[in-house]
Amino acid sequence: MFPMFDPLYLIMLIPGLLIAGWASFKVKAAYNKYSKIRSFSGYSGASIARLILDRNGLNDVAVEQVPGHLSDHYDPRSRTLRLSPQVYQSSSIAALGIAAHEAGHALQHKTQYAPLQLRSFMVPVASFGSNFAWIIMFIGIFMASMGSSAGSTLIMIGVSLFGAAVAFTLVTLPVEFNASTRAKAMLTQYGIVSAEEQKGVSNVLNAAAMTYVAAAVTAVLQLLYWLIRLGLLGGDD
């Protein structure tokens, strides 16, 4: 059973691919547009991140520049907000939105935002599942085809691990949307962006959020495919 040669797999994957392609286009278009428009405040992404963190009592959270294109992220383990050069140094509307979004994750960490805590708890299992679930399932399928009773057990283990990876993508959605909501609110509350600039920030962050939606849809469809093909959903064909 090789999914890439299975018409059902390709049919089920089409919605995810379409959403992913559309999301990628929207992100590139929004970022390319608003990365060229300088904010009236003149703040850089690094300055905005520092301002938001300090105003929320997170003076101990460091803001660092890291290499890579849009490699921005918040590391809860080291309590460090890391920004790519395009965001750290720029005073564009796109940079301010992205920096504020990452600061939003730091605030989630401070307030023990439940979905973020759940996602952090799921990381080890989800990481293992995304890397090894396929291998375990294929071994199980092969063993089952050879008449081994252990094959079914391995198949169920593989499906469960992949299910954990899928659940991780779903839990990621409220984490990312909430961070963007916090970012938009703080940029307006602190008078960092004008009403017109807020539209640009929203366009950039909303487009970025759709990439997570695309990933979740694709993961769910892949899981449904395996459940159907393995006879765990709707019977075995």
Image (cartoon, grey):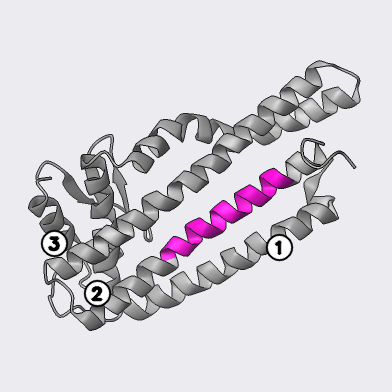
Give the number of the mark in front: 1 or 3. Answer: 1
Q: Is residue 73 left or right of residue 121?
A: left
Instruction: Report the amino acid beneath label 2.
Output: Ser
Amino acid on which the number 3 mark rests in the picture: Ser
Q: Residues within 10 Å of mark 3 (few under 14, many from 20)?
A: some
Spot the residue most to the top. 149
- Name the residue that disc number 1 marks: 14
Q: Secondary structure at mark 1?
A: helix
- Spatial separation of the CA atoms under disc 1 and disc 3: 42 Å
- Taking depth in this image into account, of 55 and 91 the one nearest to the observer is 55
Which region shows up in magenta? 208-224
What residue is drawn where x is 46% and y is 44%?
A: 171
Q: Which residue is mark 2?
A: 92
Q: Nearer the viewer, mark 1 or mark 2?
A: 1
Q: Main secondary structure of the magenta part?
A: helix
The CA distance from mark 3 to mark 2 is: 12 Å
Look at 37% across and 49% down and name the residue there: 175
Residue 117 belongs to the span the image colors magenta: no
Which residue corresponds to the image point at 38% horizontal and 57% vertical from the top-left? 177
Name the spot of residue 202 as percent of width and height, x first: 33, 72
Q: Residue tagged by mark 3? A: 47
